[in-house]
Image: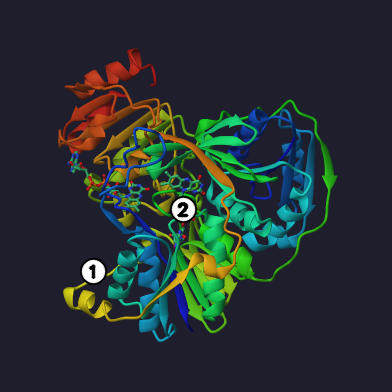
Amino acid sequence: MANLVIVEHDNNEVAAATLHAVTAAQQIGGDIDLLVAGENCGAVAEEAAKIAGVSSVKVADDAKFGHHLAENLATLIVEVAAGYSHVLASATTFGKNVMPHAAALLDKAQISEIVEVKSADTFVRPIYAGNALATVQSSDSIKIITVRTIKFEAAAAEGGSANVEAISGGTDTGLSSWVSQAVSSNDQVDLTSAKIVISGGRGMQSGDNFSMLHSVADKLGAAVGASRAAVDSGFVPNEFQVGQTGKVIAPDLYIAVGISGAIQHLAGMKESKVIVAINNDSEAPIFQVADYGLVADLFEAVPELDAAL
Amino acid sequence: MKILVCVKRVLDPQVKARVKADESGVDLANAKMTMNPFCENALEEALRLREAGIGEEIIVASVGGGKTEETLRHGLAMGADRAIQVVTEETLEPLAIAKVLKQVAEQESVGLVLAGKQAIDDDSNQTAQMLSALLGWSQATYCSEIKIEGDKATVTREVDAGLETIEVKMPAVMSADLRLNEPRYVKLPDVMKAKRKPMDKIELDSLGLDTANRLTTLKVEEPEGRAAGVIVNSVSELVEKLRNEAKVI
Ligand SMILES: Cc1cc2nc3c(=O)[nH]c(=O)nc-3n(C[C@H](O)[C@H](O)[C@H](O)COP(=O)(O)OP(=O)(O)OC[C@H]3O[C@@H](n4cnc5c(N)ncnc54)[C@H](O)[C@@H]3O)c2cc1C
Ligand SMILES: Cc1cc2nc3c(=O)[nH]c(=O)nc-3n(C[C@H](O)[C@H](O)[C@H](O)COP(=O)(O)OP(=O)(O)OC[C@H]3O[C@@H](n4cnc5c(N)ncnc54)[C@H](O)[C@@H]3O)c2cc1C
């Protein structure tokens, strides 16, 4: 058995999510190689070579991979995948975008967002917003997999000494080109890896009121998240969204403020270790998953919490 | 430009999925079903493109058995011109669905395919990407804004880091995110009109495609629930418990 893990990166650094995909590969067993495709991404390859348990790092440094456009990157994955039994990536918007494209070119199924490795061909994945878990067995010769990061520990970023090999290949399909990226909140603690997250919902009433949450977050070293309703209402940008169609997170502490607890929101946070709900409606479904519930007006409770910390 | 919109019939998002006692799957008997919400966004976008003079005929297509026709009729009531049901009672995987939709897209000579970014039942988030690969067309997933000008489109995508804008050549396959638009409500006269719109039915077997499943579902089970929590009476009690009982702050 041999695993190929597609490294997610910004041409400077390995994304933390990749370390979780490496752990899933370790659980499958066999050699683990990494593929770094990008432009001027030598630093990424060096960093990747230090990840514990990795045998070799293949680097395709080429302008056509600079922005990880799915059509070009998939052609490279297809060429490299030939020597592997498993090809994995994290189930981030990067992995979700490119992996099915590569899978279809290979005429293979994709097993999306696995949460458990049962054996080399059998995996568990959530369906119906996490309300059911399906155990699926694959008969494909190459298994294309995306990994739900919260269910696998991060592999050690240091300790390995893989050899780095430059490769060429892939096609410039010329189908799409990158224009720009808007990142509105780069001083934020990263939502997906934060130990503590405080999220606001429609009950927050405005974007300005989120400053109350940011103040608490600063004291706790926490990230700020949101429900879809808060994003749709324009209180905060889309990258704050937690849920079935936003980010799936599992911090040690999740504080839901003015969030009702819809199925789709729970799908993104119900694996958190400790859940706190602050809501003025004692019937809100969020209380059914909360370890600690506080029935209170958030406009009183949050400043009080801020003062108590 | 003809537009193909791929729509799927799913369990209503307000309904909590219940796993069958024999662990063979989710119990959908008598459950309330609707058009996948993301597919409604895809269709709404097609309708707006037609209203803007960019789209011409809009075809809604779905692969499925039983009552799939109901979902397609809903699409016709929203405003699609005609519908194609590829009939099968089997549950196909995204790769097979993409193979079927590729044939439909080619047969109909469409210039754009719009799909939902994910189906809320199986949550695969694959079909549009696979279809793009099989057609050899540009791919734009998780779209929150689509601007088509001539033979290219500028698309804003919702990604983990924020918003990414890319330019794609047409023809293209695009998948809709929820913030792409607000799908319109269907009015009763539209439902009546939809009954008279054309609905083609194609038997899956007649397409001669390899749609064999690659995955076998061994079992479907309910996830472990969370133990019941407590209601605290004050912020100070909450902070005390988080510090000394849960030890998370
Ligand atoms: C296909 C699909 C995908 C979806 N994906 C997601 C997703 O990824 N993430 C997501 O979050 N949602 C998602 N949703 C939306 C989801 O169904 C809910 O609509 C949404 O989560 C509701 O957000 P909310 O809890 O902030 O708002 P509401 O449901 O309106 O709840 C607001 C809560 O605030 C409380 N409140 C109001 N004022 C106060 C106050 N002063 N003090 C204290 N409490 C107060 C109220 O009691 C209420 O419980 C999706 C829906 C669909 C159909
Ligand atoms: C109990 C149970 C077990 C299952 N087991 C498996 C299994 O083992 N393996 C497996 O792969 N699947 C399984 N399925 C799911 C079923 O096969 C999926 O519906 C199919 O794989 C498509 O996945 P998706 O809908 O999540 O696709 P996504 O890629 O999430 O769908 C995205 C978009 O593609 C389009 N689309 C999807 N399906 C259709 C369609 N039928 N017609 C037209 N357009 C469509 C829509 O625009 C949709 O918004 C199971 C389902 C259940 C309920």
User: Looking at the rendering, which quadrant does residue A258 occupy?
Assistant: top left
Secondary structure state at the residue bearing disc 2: loop
Please tell me which residue is depicted at 43% across the width and 30% down the height of the picture.
Answer: A251
Say if A108 sits above or below A176 in the image. above
As displayed, is residue A17 above or below residue A180?
A: above
- From the viewer's perspective, tell me whether residue B224 is left or right of residue B159: left
Horizontal side of residue A306 vs B147, given as left or right: left
Residue A268 visible? no
Residues packed near mark 2 inside 10 Å, few (<14), some (14 to 19) or many (20 plus): few
Question: Of residues A227 and A283, which is closer to you in this image?
Answer: A283
Q: In percent of the image, x 64 and y 71: which residue is there?
A: A175
Quarter that holds the C terminus of chain B: top left
Which residue is more in the foreground, B207 or B247?
B207
Q: Earlier in the sequence, mark 1 or mark 2?
A: 2
Q: Is mark 1 within 8 Å of ligand 1?
A: no
Q: Is mark 2 within 8 Å of ligand 2?
A: yes
Q: Determine whether A282 is above or below A246 in the image.
A: above
- Asked whether the viewer can see residue A65, the reply is yes
Return the residue at label 1: B185
Which chain is indicated by disc 1?
Answer: B
Element under label 1?
loop
Q: Residue at x 64, y 47 (%)?
A: A9
Q: Position of residue A293 (x, y in %)?
A: 23, 27
Real-space CA distance between mark 1 and mark 2, rounded to the nearest whole angstrom? 29 Å
What chain does mark 2 sit on?
A: B
Residue A119: image x %, image y %?
A: 62, 30
Q: Disc 2 designates what residue?
A: B91
- Tally of numbered tags: 2
In the rendered structure, which amino acid carries the disc numbered 1? Tyr
* Label 1 vs label 2, nearer the camera: 2
Q: Is residue B65 above or below residue B108?
A: above
